[in-house]
Each structure stands twice: as structure tokens, then as C-alpha cells.
């Protein structure tokens, strides 16, 4: 799919009318998180916003005030604690302050970015698997 963004490709199978643009204030997000977020995540938020896709929860960056308060900022402390107490990615020496959650899934699996450098578009995704080894 050369020339198509990931969000454009996703719209072929996950219709846009199911989304709800969060109208994210990215300046406020960056100030709150002290970092920009990946472009594909920002594009996804512009079309779909945060919420459920089957068993996957995609977290909005900040609480939305809509009654559902799940957010990156709300999940960050718990994700950092998992990283610190259960161990991060084998062979990766980065501390808990270098992971940032973006989603959660069935069976309490957690998804995030490993902030390996200043360019968020180059951050790999990490998955903490609660019931598997290695986690």
C-alpha cells in the first residue's frame, strides 16, 4: 500500500463513522507528557479517538471528561510500575520512565511505546503480556 498511511489503510476495514475525533489539543498533550507522540497515533486520534476496538482499548492522551477516564496519563504510573517490578524487555536497559502506554487489551495485556530516542515515529511498540513468559 505504498503512499497510504496506516490510518488510511485501517479505514478500509474499520469504518470512519465508528470513530469520534477527540479534538486533541496536542500542545497541551506535549506539555503534559513532556514529549510529542507518534504521528500514526495522532492520525488515529484524529479519525477514531480513544476507545474500544473489540478487546483492544486505545487510550486517548488525556482524560476526555466524557465519563470514561482511561488515558495515557491515567495509565502511565501503572505501566511504569509493571516495567519496574516485572522487568522490561529482555536485553533492554531503559528504565520505567522510558515507556509510555497507549493501549490495553484482553487478559490485562498492556501496550506502549519504548521511548528509545527523541523521534516518537521511531519508537518501537512494546507489549506486556501478563500471563506469558517473558512478559
Image (cartoon, rainbow, N blue to C red):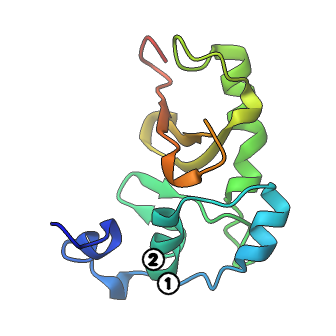
Question: Neighbour class for label 1 at 10 Å: few (<14), some, many (≥20)?
Answer: some
Q: Position of residue 82 (x, y in %)?
A: 67, 25
Q: Which residue is painted at 77% across and 33% down in the image? A: 97
Labels in figure, total: 2
106 vs 31, nearest the viewer: 31
Residue at point 67%, 24% (across, down): 83
**In the rendering, at what x and y percent does residue 26 appear?**
70, 75
Q: Position of residue 117 (x, y in %)?
A: 63, 40
Q: CA distance from mark 1 to mark 2?
A: 5 Å
- The answer to whether 64 is drawn above or below residue 92 in the figure is below
Q: Is residue 85 above or below residue 115?
A: above
Q: Is residue 37 left or right of residue 3?
A: right
Disc 1 on helix, strand or loop? loop
Q: Residue at x 45, y 77 (%)?
A: 48
Q: Quadrant of residue 28?
A: bottom right
For disc 1, the marked residue is 20
**Viewer-nearest residue: 11 or 78:** 11
Picture quadrant of residue 9: bottom left
Disc ID at residue 48: 2
- Could you classify mark 2 by the number of other residues whose Cα lies within 10 Å: few (under 14), some (14-19), or many (20 or more)? many
Vertical relation: 41 (above or below) 134: below
Task: Provide residue 125's location: percent of width, then percent of height.
Answer: 47, 40
- Image check: 125 left or right of 92? left
Give the residue drawn at x 65%, y 16%. 93
Q: Secondary structure at mark 2?
A: loop
Q: Are marks 1 and 2 in contact (CB under 8 Å)?
A: yes
* Mark with earlier residue (1, 2): 1
Locate the N terminus by quadrant. bottom left
Amino acid at each position: 500500500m505504498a503512499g497510504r498511511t496506516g490510518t488510511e489503510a485501517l479505514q478500509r476495514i474499520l469504518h470512519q463513522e465508528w470513530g469520534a475525533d477527540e479534538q486533541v489539543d496536542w500542545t497541551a498533550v506535549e506539555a503534559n507528557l513532556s514529549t510529542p507522540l507518534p504521528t500514526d497515533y495522532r492520525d488515529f486520534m484524529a479519525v477514531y479517538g480513544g476507545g474500544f476496538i473489540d478487546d483492544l482499548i486505545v487510550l486517548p492522551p488525556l482524560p476526555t471528561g466524557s465519563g470514561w477516564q482511561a488515558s495515557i496519563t491515567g495509565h502511565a504510573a501503572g505501566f511504569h510500575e509493571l516495567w519496574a517490578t516485572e522487568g522490561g524487555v529482555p536485553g533492554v536497559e531503559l528504565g520505567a520512565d522510558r515507556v509510555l502506554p497507549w493501549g490495553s487489551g484482553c487478559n490485562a495485556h498492556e501496550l506502549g511505546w519504548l521511548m528509545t530516542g527523541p523521534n516518537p515515529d521511531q519508537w518501537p511498540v512494546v507489549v506486556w503480556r501478563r500471563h506469558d513468559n517473558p512478559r
